[in-house]
């Protein structure tokens, strides 16, 4: 694959006005950027709040950089008449506007959906917010922690009997960013058929409900409220982390055939014929007893040895990697999942790559630079002036 930042993507030619800040919105527009769209990041004069979030490299936020590589920054005060003229001109050329303000904020500035749709009927307006643009909570402020709590995922995370635990990454923001990006792409396709733009309204809390998956299905099927299970799967056994002779590993034997292979591989072929564990339903009912039996066998060797044995037998398993292990993993490297971008001071920063691999487009190892606040202003103003000539 190509290794230059000029590689186009399927959204090449699409211009996105990015009024977002911090995480949910910038994650959405980063995905769109990785797919080839031009992202014009419209920042308040003081800049995206995330520019002040650590960790820092030479005084610059690595957090901000990881979400805003390859974008162009222009600082505009949307309460200032001159800056509003610039923004109005940008709206004339934009395909998509993405914002993650609290509902009503852009309406008060004269840039809400109704007004913009009347002026720019082809414009796609995507809004990501805590609770969406309808319902009794729509005016509430929200952060990732709030929607993880209210959306149910925290009640499922952690060990049995443990205090509530937040998922270790900001899944409240990130899922909202992903669903917003999906909505934008669907709206772009719809526009090719109808010529019309639309409003996309994505709520962080809605996204948490959408990913409750097995927990929601179990509740509706049984009426029982699910709780945390640590690493254990609620309905497939054995499917969790197991202690070995020198650490831990995960094993996911998702059917009877794999369970038999697992038992044979650890020297306990008898377990596959044990009536207590003969079916998945039986194993799930006796999960603690089965875990004790398996861990007694696994204690004979270390994790590395068991990984080799189980992988050779075709049993799904894996080590429990820390972040340092992940970034050095051969598979991660082969999939180009750690890329680099240049900071405004010229430092090379490493960050997560794009997991969407496409046969028609390259997957560059180097991405566009991180924008300094307002650094694209002259270029953008010159383009607008040329368009009006």
Image (cartoon, grey):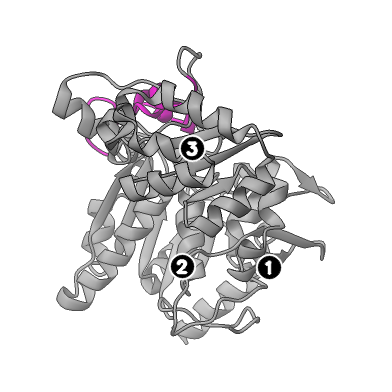
Q: Quadrant of residue 296?
A: top right
**Whether label 3 touches label 2, CB < 8 Å:** no
Q: Residue furthest right?
A: 58
Q: CA distance from mark 1 to mark 3?
A: 55 Å
State whether residue 173 is above or below residue 11: above
Residue 225: x and y in percent read: 26, 19
Q: Residue at x 59, y 58 (%)?
A: 68
Q: Answer left or right for 234 relative to 336.
A: left
Q: Residue at x 16, y 77 (%)?
A: 193
Residue 194: tell me if it is visible. Answer: yes
Residue 160: x and y in percent read: 45, 17
Q: Is residue 74 magenta?
A: no
Residue 386: x and y in percent read: 51, 85
Q: Nearer the viewer, residue 366 or 84?
A: 366
**What residue does disc 2 label?**
356
Q: CA distance from mark 3 to mark 2?
A: 41 Å
């Amino acid at each position: 694959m190509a290794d230059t930042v000029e590689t186009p993507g399927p959204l090449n030619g699409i211009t996105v006005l990015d009024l977002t800040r911090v995480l949910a919105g910038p994650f959405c527009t980063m995905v769109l950027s990785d797919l080839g769209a031009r992202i014009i990041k419209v920042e308040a004069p003081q800049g995206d709040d995330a520019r002040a979030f650590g960790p820092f490299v030479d005084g610059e936020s690595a957090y901000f950089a990881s979400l805003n590589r390859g974008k162009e920054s222009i600082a505009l005060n949307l309460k200032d008449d001159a800056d509003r003229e610039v923004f109005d001109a940008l709206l004339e050329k934009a395909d998509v506007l993405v914002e993650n303000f609290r509902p009503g904020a852009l309406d008060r500035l004269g840039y809400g959906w109704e007004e913009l749709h009347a002026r720019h009927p082809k414009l796609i307006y995507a809004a990501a917010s805590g609770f969406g643009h309808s319902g009794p909570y729509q005016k509430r402020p929200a952060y990732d922690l709030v929607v993880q709590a209210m959306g149910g995922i925290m009640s499922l995370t952690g060990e049995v009997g443990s205090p509530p635990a937040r998922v270790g990454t900001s899944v409240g923001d990130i899922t909202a960013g992903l669903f917003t990006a999906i909505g934008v792409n669907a709206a772009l396709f719809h526009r090719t058929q109808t010529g019309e733009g639309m409003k996309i309204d994505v709520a962080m809390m809605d996204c948490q409900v959408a990913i409750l998956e097995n927990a929601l299905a179990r509740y509706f099927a049984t009426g029982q409220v699910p709780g945390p299970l640590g690493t254990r799967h609620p309905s497939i056994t054995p499917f969790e982390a197991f202690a070995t002779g020198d650490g831990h590993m995960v094993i996911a034997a998702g059917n009877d055939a794999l369970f038999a292979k697992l038992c044979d591989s650890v020297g306990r072929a008898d377990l596959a014929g044990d009536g207590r564990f003969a079916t998945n339903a039986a194993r799930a009912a006796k999960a603690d007893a089965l875990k004790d039996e398996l861990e007694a066998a696994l204690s004979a060797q270390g994790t590395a040895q068991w990984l080799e044995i189980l992988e050779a037998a075709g049993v799904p398993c894996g080590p429990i990697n820390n972040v340092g292990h992940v970034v050095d993993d051969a598979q991660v490297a082969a999939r180009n999942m750690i890329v680099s971008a240049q900071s405004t001071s010229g430092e090379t920063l490493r960050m997560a790559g794009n997991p969407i691999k496409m046969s028609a487009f390259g997957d560059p190892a180097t991405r566009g630079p991180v924008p300094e606040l307002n650094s694209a202003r002259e270029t953008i103003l010159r383009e607008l002036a040329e368009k009006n000539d």
